[in-house]
Image: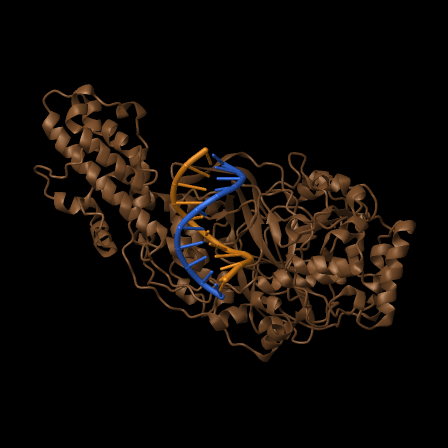
Chain colours: A brown, B blue, C orange
Amino acid sequence: MSLSMRDPVIPGTSMAYHPFLPHRAPDFAMSAVLGHQPPFFPALTLPPNGAAALSLPGALAKPIMDQLVGAAETGIPFSSLGPQAHLRPLKTMEPEEDVEDDPKVHLEAKELWDQFHKRGTEMVITKSGRRMFPPFKVRCSGLDKKAKYILLMDIIAADDCRYKFHNSRWMVAGKADPEMPKRMYIHPDSPATGEQWMSKVVTFHKLKLTNNISDKHGFTLAFPSDHATWQGNYSFGTQTILNSMHKYQPRFHIVRANDILKLPYSTFRTYLFPETEFIAVTAYQNDKITQLKIDNNPFAKGFRDTGNGRREKRKQLTLQSMRVFDERHKKETSDESSSEQAAFNCFAQASSPAVSIVGTSNLKDLCPSEAESDAEAESKEEHGPEACDAAKISTTTAEEPGRDKGSPATRAQLFPAEPSRARDTARLDKASPDSRHSPATISSSTRVPGADERRSPGREGPVATKVDEARAIPAKDAFAPLSVQTDATAHLAQGPLPGLGFAPGLAGQQFFNGHPLFLHPGQFAMGGAFSSMAAGMGPLLATVSGASTGVSGLESTAMASAAAAQGLSGASAATLPFHLQQHVLASQGLAMSPFGSLFPYPYTYMAAAAAASTAAASSSVHRHPFLNLNSMRPRLRYSPYSIPVPVPDSSSLLTTALPSMASAAGPLDGKAAALAASPASVAVDSGSELNSRSSTLSSGSVSLSPKLCSEKEAATSELQSIQRLVSGLEAKPDRSCSGSP
DNA sequence: TCTCTCACTTC
DNA sequence: TGAAGTGAGAG
């Protein structure tokens, strides 16, 4: 059976597709209703003893199996593993309960997402990884309280285009670049019971976005093309690799499964929230997004206009300097109106230390002393236009209104129904979130055996509008059947390696019975839930990447690129001693679920994980004037990182058992959250002023005229001093020069 | 465009 | 106290 993501999702219906297959987001209006709907075809179920499978090469498998089985059979803490971790044989896994559920998902911080969506949908990605902003958080309901679920998130290409920010708006700039290796992020608390999930806001704020194709924060599992379920390859990790200037769509998945190992064979319920679509960038293109983040992200507080951060100070210095220049300019213009050349005038303006200006009513305001208080400076800034040329210089502010138009338009193509709900319904979202968010719900199950999946020829992944095609095309990343590689020794000696345990029972299970398993070395970091899988498949994982984990053993060469990694996985893969693997896992900040995962209780080695803290407790919204251009919306308060929610006992369990894990949970964030509103303040778009001012600089104008030189030597000296105080302002005098002859 | 460093922030 | 998350700005 073949289903296409492009098929419209009709309320009351659902679609089935393989969540791990490369494909793009559907390009249809997201009008699907929330909730679970029977998939078009039932989830693929495994024979009792797992007939599907993967197998390890005999020589390699034996030692691994012996170790794992041994650990599993003992049933006691595997001391060599270091932390008190228990391994639970797969054979003890209880079949998934046949429970009834009707999952519904509500996107949290929707107001913020709506604003984000309206302002340009840019999301920064960096080599080292950047958190998503706004944070992706959801609240689930309708789950069976006792059944266990695994919650995941991934990000897929929204279309097959590359974008560019031109004329204050995003425009298609060609065909998309080759798709990056796809990764699935498993919520650290998985698997957990429905009750536990519903008791808190499920947050994915620890997921990072990167453009580093050789990122090590994950591992990839490659399956033979004829594998019944896992066609193509997919990786898991804490960082998702994206292409800059490309549009993406986050997806949220709910899988009812009591063990990560069952994930590949379970039914996925997928939810899409159109407003979370974004364009990955390495640097902000649209300052509206920048401002939105500055105003809402605690970590960017230093850049708020109301703060005492560098931004504020720098802006003040800049303004002061600019004012001085303006004065100079005016003065010089007046003095030289008779005979000096424009270039000289310019220089004179810039260099003249004399502040006194003739005929300038706002001169006083324009020439604040350096000792001027911040308050004063701010006050003056508020009067930007009269204080200086800010208004006329700044193009950013003037264009703000227009910018809004671009983004919505773009969105409309994919989600025509979206535009209408953003603003006016903002406040209502909390009241009746589910109905209003109307995320597309897609129930999926693993693909049936034999289904031929192919990828788009043009790119690794499928084309946006044609999921079927995408799936039909052979994966660019071909895997050679194989195997697990072992290089373990080296890694072992070099330090903590991700904890990978083999689920003891796994030996006889599906993963090891027949099909080759390909792994990408070096990519390893998983969420707790995933640790379970890692535990079960760890040994099969090619290698543990060391970079981020401090493991030097891994050769970067083997992981230079995803492709390389795949190709070399066999050679570089290493089998790690179980205990070391776990250490690695822990060191990478992976949380292990206390709920039914392989590790029933706190894993004390989670150094990195423990370090991770919950997101900021609270965040106040500072509305910048230009952000309110359309605003019919009342001032809203956002708490992107923390949403106050009742904290059920179950959440405390999380907290107690696994601090690091708990940190990722919404409830915890909520506890700390204090929706404090920051006082409204007048924001000044100083940045735009500076930018515009510097845009027309002419280096040549700096040359000093012999004639003027003698007269303004002192002035020049002083000016230079000022300039030195204002970083990046050196060229601006020139600009004023050329700009106003 | 991208990468890196910086000062600043939260926790 | 320090790790980690920020945008700005230089290159």
Residue A320: % across, % down: 23, 44
Residue A90: % across, % down: 82, 66
Residue A230: % across, % down: 76, 51
Q: Residue at x 23, y 51 (%)?
A: A377
Position of A672 relative to A405 (above/below) = below
Q: Residue at x 65, y 43 (%)?
A: A214
**Picture mark count:** 0
Q: Residue at x 14, y 26 (%)?
A: A711
Residue A96: % across, % down: 76, 69
Q: Quadrant of the C terminus of chain A?
A: top left
Is residue A462 visible in the rendered image? The answer is yes
User: Farthest residue toward the left?
Assistant: A359
Residue in front for this viewpoint, A228 or A482: A482
Is residue A289 visible in the rendered image? The answer is no
Could you tell whether A660 is left or right of A512 in the image? Answer: left
Residue in front for this viewpoint, A352 or A26: A352
Position of A234 relative to A333 (above/below) = below
Residue in front for this viewpoint, A84 or A225: A84
Q: Residue at x 73, y 63 (%)?
A: A532
Which quadrant would residue A348 be assigned to in this image?
A: top left
Residue in front for this viewpoint, A39 or A219: A219
Position of A55 relative to B10 (above/below) = above
